[in-house]
Image (cartoon, rainbow, N blue to C red):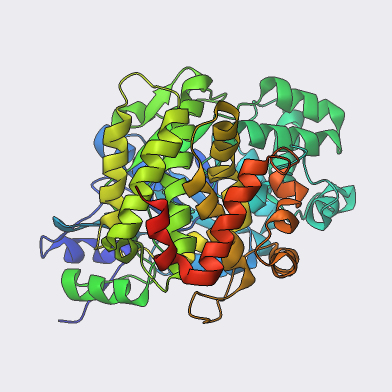
């Protein structure tokens, strides 16, 4: 039978075969859009939108449906997909136990900002909007890792700072500012800015960047945002591969649904968020979100996740890609990689992490190995290789810096960094050229080639690495040895030297 196109009017037909759950709540005029989300991609649709869906379905929440916003020209694809199916999409959870599919209905409307800049600002400024949430990736924050300041000289920020462009901004901060300025003028509360990006201190960084931006526009508005605004920190987690053509085809075959952009993900999901909202929030805790009072606790969860999960992903991606792999689970099937990752987590990362009451770090590491090994989600290495300059300095370097400080082992962390340095040169171990997606590629690739197997050139990029580590002899020695090993023997032949 031909698959049924996903739309509101086809929902009951879609659920008739008993294979797919459809939203059990009305999506009608009574629903209010309390959340505006910038950056609707796979991750948002597997994470925040699912929590909101559960709130609507299980707890009758009607004030917090989502209005999705796309700021970038490439978001036109998401707009077309969602608009063609009444903003519905299918979420497919895959694991060894099988595939579970459900239609998610929490995204109520979608604005493509490049064509509707005023409508985007007006939507955020509207009194029904209580939260503006973000998944805009590290580069969307214009955050200088070295100075910890806003990249105010960046041409996009310069454009948005020019009052002549205030009605037609380009960046997230331009839009947030324009909407908040309106709310300020109208005597409303600010909305909460809720970052769902995978960054340490994502809320504090959002606050600092936005307030810095606002100071350059109007100090009064800036002070109002600083004083009255809320920017909760949060740890977000759910492995969400890019949707492939095969995913769409299998959705049609197995579930009989034609969906132009479904989302495939794992069963696991976690969100730990600081309870700091200024204009109300839905009862997130009722659907499994860990809402915590203390920002320190959120930071500890973030540390665990970024350094263990994302840090391990870094060796899986750069090491695995150099060795010729395409998928995460395939890398995990190689016992050399599995052992390396386990030992890096256990011996090098875990000892540096704070204890959180109720969290068993050994269990956490075991679960990570299982999640990485999930053969059904087909998580692609190029997805995780993307934008290494935003990842290695966050996921690996802080562990190395702390390990040096407390004199604990860090050779596997150095090997991981070395794998990225070699990857940046642009060739797999067998000489196959790599198509690298990296905003700093030109600069980094030139330095990588100049340096050969000497890491100093790359380590001198201050905006990524600061000044602290270059003077440490042991660190330089370890990373040089690892670069020499990979260059001479390739990743696979080098790994045994790094495993006990
Ligand atoms: C990945 C993450 O892109 C990456 O670097 O490590 O997207 C990872 O899948 C998520 O953080 C999991 O929550």
36 with respect to 304 (left or right): right
**Residue 356 seen in render:** yes
**Residue 386 seen in render:** no
Tell me what residue is drawn at x 84 percent, y 26 percent. 220
What percent of the width, then of the height, locates residue 319?
A: 46, 62
381 with respect to 8 (left or right): right
Up-down: is 11 above or below 180? below
Up-down: is 167 above or below 430? above
What percent of the width, then of the height, locates residue 452?
A: 68, 67
Q: Nearer the viewer, residue 466 or 201?
A: 466
Q: Nearer the viewer, residue 283 or 189?
A: 283
What percent of the width, then of the height, locates residue 497?
A: 41, 56
Q: Nearer the viewer, residue 471 or 261?
A: 471
Which of the image's four quarters has the N terminus?
A: bottom left
Q: How many marks on residues?
A: 0
Tell me what residue is drawn at x 31 percent, y 36 percent. 364
* Residue 11, quarter of the rendered image: bottom left
Tell me what residue is drawn at x 16 percent, y 61 percent. 15
196 with respect to 151 (left or right): left
Q: Nearer the viewer, residue 252 or 380?
A: 380
* Residue 388, quarter of the rendered image: bottom right
What percent of the width, then of the height, locates residue 8?
A: 31, 61
Up-down: is 403 above or below 13? above
Tell me what residue is drawn at x 57 percent, y 32 percent. 402
């Amino acid at each position: 039978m031909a698959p049924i196109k996903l739309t509101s009017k086809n929902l009951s037909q879609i659920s008739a075969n008993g294979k797919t759950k459809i939203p059990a709540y009305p999506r009608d005029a009574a629903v209010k859009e309390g959340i505006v989300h910038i950056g609707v991609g796979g991750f948002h649709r597997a994470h925040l939108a699912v929590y909101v869906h559960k709130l609507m379905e299980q707890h009758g929440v009607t004030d917090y449906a989502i209005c999705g916003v796309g700021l970038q020209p490439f978001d036109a694809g998401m707009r077309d997909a969602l608009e063609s199916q009444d903003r519905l999409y299918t979420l497919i959870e895959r694991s060894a136990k099988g595939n579970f599919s459900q239609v998610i209905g929490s995204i109520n409307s979608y604005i493509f900002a490049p064509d509707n800049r005023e409508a985007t600002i007006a939507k955020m400024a509207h009194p029904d909007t209580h939260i503006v949430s973000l998944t805009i990736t590290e580069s969307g924050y214009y955050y200088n890792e070295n100075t910890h300041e806003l990249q105010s000289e960046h041409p996009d920020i310069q454009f948005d700072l020019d009052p002549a462009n205030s009605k037609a901004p380009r960046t997230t901060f331009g839009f947030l500012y324009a909407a908040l300025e309106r709310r300020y003028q109208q005597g409303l509360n600010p909305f909460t800015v809720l970052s769902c990006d995978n960054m340490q201190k994502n809320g504090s960084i959002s606050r600092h960047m936005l307030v810095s931006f606002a100071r350059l526009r109007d100090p009064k508005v800036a002070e109002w945002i600083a004083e009255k605004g809320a920017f909760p920190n949060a740890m977000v987690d759910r492995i969400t591969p890019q949707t492939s053509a095969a995913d769409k085809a299998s959705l049609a075959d197995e579930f009989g649904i034609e969906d132009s952009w479904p989302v495939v993900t794992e069963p696991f999901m976690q969100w730990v968020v600081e309870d700091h909202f200024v204009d109300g929030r839905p009862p997130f805790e009722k659907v499994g979100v860990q809402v915590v009072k203390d920002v320190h606790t959120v930071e500890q969860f973030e540390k665990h996740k970024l350094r263990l999960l994302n840090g391990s992903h870094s060796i899986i991606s750069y090491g695995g890609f150099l060795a010729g792999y395409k998928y995460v689970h395939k890398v995990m099937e190689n016992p050399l990689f599995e052992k390396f990752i386990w030992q890096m987590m256990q011996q090098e990362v875990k000892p540096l992490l704070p204890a959180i009451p109720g969290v068993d770090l050994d269990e956490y590491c075991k679960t990570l190995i299982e999640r990485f090994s999930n053969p059904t989600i087909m998580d692609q290495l190029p997805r995780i290789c993307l934008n290494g300059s935003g990842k290695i300095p966050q996921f690996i370097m802080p562990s190395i810096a702390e390990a040096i400080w407390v004199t604990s082992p860090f050779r596997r962390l150095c090997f991981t960094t070395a794998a990225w340095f070699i990857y940046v040169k642009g060739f797999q171990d067998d000489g196959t050229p790599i198509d690298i997606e990296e905003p700093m590629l030109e600069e980094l690739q030139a330095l990588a080639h100049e340096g050969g197997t000497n890491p100093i050139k790359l380590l001198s990029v201050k905006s990524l690495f600061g000044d602290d580590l270059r003077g440490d002899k042991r660190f330089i020695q370890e990373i040089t040895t690892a670069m020499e090993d990979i260059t001479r023997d390739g990743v696979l032949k080098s790994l045994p030297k790094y495993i006990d």
